[in-house]
Amino acid sequence: MPAAPRARPSDLFTPEDWAPFQSRSRWLGPLLVLHCWAVIAAAVALGVLWPVLIPLSVAVIGTRQLGLAILMHEAAHGSLSPDRRLNDFLGHWFCAVPVGATLNAYRPYHLAHHKYAQQPEDPDLVLSAPFPVSRASLRRKIVRDLSGQTFFKQRVLLPLTALRGRVSGAATDDHANEAIVTGRSVAPFLLVNAALLTAAIAAGVWWAFFALWLLPMATWFPMATRLRNIAEHACVEGSTTDPFRAARTTRAAWWERAFVAPYWVNFHAEHHLFMWVNSYKLPALHEKLREKGMLDRMEVAPGYLSVLSKATGRNSV
């Protein structure tokens, strides 16, 4: 099984250039987790106080649920904290479990994705291999996401299959998610969500758990995850042979960062080049690669609409 091609920092940067990207903060990672939950809490309060704003709250919360999965991904790389125990505790209980995942299952899965990125052994190849697709096909996928069908497959059918010990290796892009569902993740997921429901009942807004936590998880979260997955690897020419083209970076506008791509996840080409660099340093790494004249070698999209255009085989949206 040949591993994906690699780039070495020493091939591009002097030791002085590279030094800032090697250090890891003790407090920024935990603050990002706190920020994610604070945004969720604020959006819940907004929906409770002004129910007319519930659709906006659903989109914001669904994106931050994706944010929790992204921060779980950060923990899988040991990047939430240089303290391994704190890194794994935050990444598992405050990021993975609330959205139905387990860090211990996700970490080896994701590191295999990096080792074999876009090779036949890549466990995430199912996310990018089908593209480009027709507009009708993409529309059907998004309808499945927003109607809760994808959620049902991921959060009901897959756990039942996992609990019975009959997990199939033939996953589809409806099943693939940042949140890796296993039999071991079901009980913690139910426990944490029971605690959230209890808190909502104690606050006198029991309905908020369903309208402002489960509904975003069942609708916006899968859709935002799908769009982000498409943007990361779909339709990138040369991705199997050139480490600079193993993934795509998307220049996200503020509204795209707010509703599709939180926590610098749009800098995915940089992440695949040097996967141990903290997510909050990826914009600076992007600029450093620009200084080195390397962006022309990379796949950089001007926005998510442009990516969807390419993923559906069109020149414009």
Image: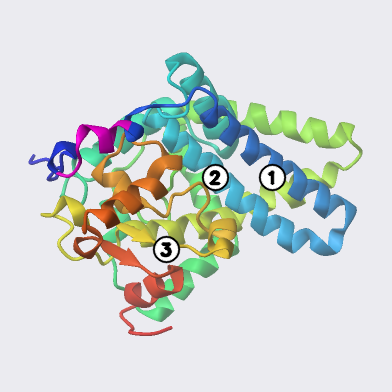
Q: Are marks 1 and 2 in contact (CB under 8 Å)?
A: yes
Q: Are marks 3 and 1 in contact (CB under 8 Å)?
A: no
Q: Quadrant of the C terminus?
A: bottom left
Q: Amino acid at mark 1?
A: Val
Question: Where does the image place residue 277, in percent across and percent down from the top left?
Answer: 34, 36
Q: Residue at x 80, y 62 (%)?
A: 53
Q: Residues within 10 Å of mark 1 (few under 14, many from 20)?
A: some
Examine the residues drawn in magenta and state their main secondary structure: helix
- Give the residues in magenta: 12-19
Q: Residue furthest left?
A: 2
Q: Count every numbered label the image shows and give the total.
A: 3
Question: Is 44 positioned to the left or the right of 221 in the image?
Answer: right
Label 3 and label 1: CA atoms lie apart by 23 Å
Q: Examine the rendered structure and indicate whether residue 289 appears above or below residue 36.
A: below
- The residue that disc 2 covers is 67
Question: Is 208 positioned to the left or the right of 35 in the image?
Answer: right
Q: Is residue 100 in view?
A: yes
Question: Where does the image place residue 231, in percent across and percent down from the top left?
Answer: 37, 62
Q: Give the mark, 3 or 1, whose residue is nearer the N terminus.
A: 1
Q: Nearer the viewer, residue 273 or 296?
A: 296
Label 1 and label 2: CA atoms lie apart by 10 Å
Q: Residue at x 82, y 47 (%)?
A: 45
Q: Nearer the viewer, residue 156 or 59?
A: 59
- The residue that disc 3 covers is 251
Label 2 and label 3: CA atoms lie apart by 18 Å
Q: Does the magenta-highlighted stretch encompass residue 296?
A: no
Instruction: Give the mark toward the camera: 3 or 1.
Output: 3
